[in-house]
Amino acid sequence: MINLVLFGPPGAGKGTQSENLIAHYKLLHLSTGDLLRSEIASHTELGIKAKQFIDEGKLVPDEVVIGMIEAKLKEAQNKNGIIFDGFPRTTNQAVALDEMLTRLGTSITKMVSLEVSQDELMKRLLLRGQTSGRTDDNEETIQKRIAEYESKTRPVADYYKAQNKLVSVEGVGSVEEIFERIRTQIDK
Ligand code: B4P
């Protein structure tokens, strides 16, 4: 099994690169951002709670996202592996993920970290905001999301570095160029 964590700040291109990776390696895609947005659209209790955090640019509490991932992991059984997109975003989530995968007799293969400057992130997300309808793609909320990333999410890279699983990829260039860089790292 190939189990990948796709990592990077908001707008780094995690969702974009996931699409190519899923098709190429036949992986199950688990995006906590997509799962949360789908809960919000369905007006579930979880969605109503999550929306308050997302609209403020804050991370949704760990127990909410960990529970959501645990429920979805069962779907991975007939796949080559899983791509975790936007999860884990805190060290607590990373520890919980390791425990869940150990119980399933598997583990994370690599974490791919997409490196993009803050100016470029802001540019991309403001552009997406013009058409996405996402309530968190406005300048004030993007600033908060980047700050939340720096304080709570960036340390997750050290967690995987300590396990010798972290690989960094330059995340600026065409979508195809970046995909080739990621593929080279995974196939090593
Ligand atoms: P996510 O949905 O994960 O959103 P993201 O970080 O904004 O997106 P991503 O990096 O995937 O960007 P994309 O490819 O779309 O999270 C949203 C919110 O949900 C979080 O803020 C948080 O509140 C909550 N949440 C999610 N997971 C959580 C967790 N585990 N714990 C707690 N809370 C959680 O790319 C962005 C834009 O750039 C797109 O418009 C794209 O077209 C463009 N782009 C991509 N690649 C490009 C390239 N090479 N060149 C130019 N533009 C590019």
Image (cartoon, rainbow, N blue to C red):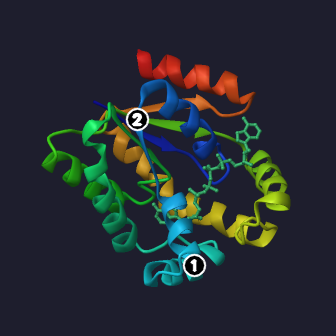
In the displayed structure image, the side of residue 48 where residue 84 appears, left or right: left
For the C terminus, the image quarter is: top left
What kind of element bears circle 2?
loop
Nearest-to-viewer mark from 1 and 2: 2
Q: Is residue 119 left or right of residue 60?
A: right
66 relative position to 18: left or right: left
Residue named by callout 2: 27
Q: Quadrant of residue 175?
A: top right
Q: Position of residue 99 (x, y in %)?
A: 20, 53
Contact, mark 1 vs mark 2 (Cβ under 8 Å): no
Q: Quadrant of the N terminus?
A: top left
Task: Please state which amino acid type lies under the numbered disc 1.
Answer: Lys
Front residue of 163/85: it is 85
Question: Where is residue 135 drawn, in percent x and y?
Answer: 72, 72
Q: Is residue 160 above or below residue 177?
A: below
Residue located beneath label 1 in the image: 51
User: Which residue: 21% across, 53% down?
Assistant: 100
Calculate the distance from the C-alpha at mark 1 to the C-alpha at mark 2.
28 Å
* Residue situated in front as seen by the camera: 3 or 45: 45
Disc 1 crowd, CA 10 A, few/some/many (<14, 14-19, 20+): many
Q: Quadrant of residue 128?
A: bottom right
Q: Earlier in the sequence, mark 1 or mark 2?
A: 2
Within 10 Å of disc 2 (Cα), the crowding (few <14, some 14-19, many 20+) is many
- Residue at image position (14%, 41%) is 105
Please provide percent x and percent y for residue 145.
64, 65
Residue 106: percent from left, percent from top: 20, 38
Q: Amino acid at mark 2?
A: Leu
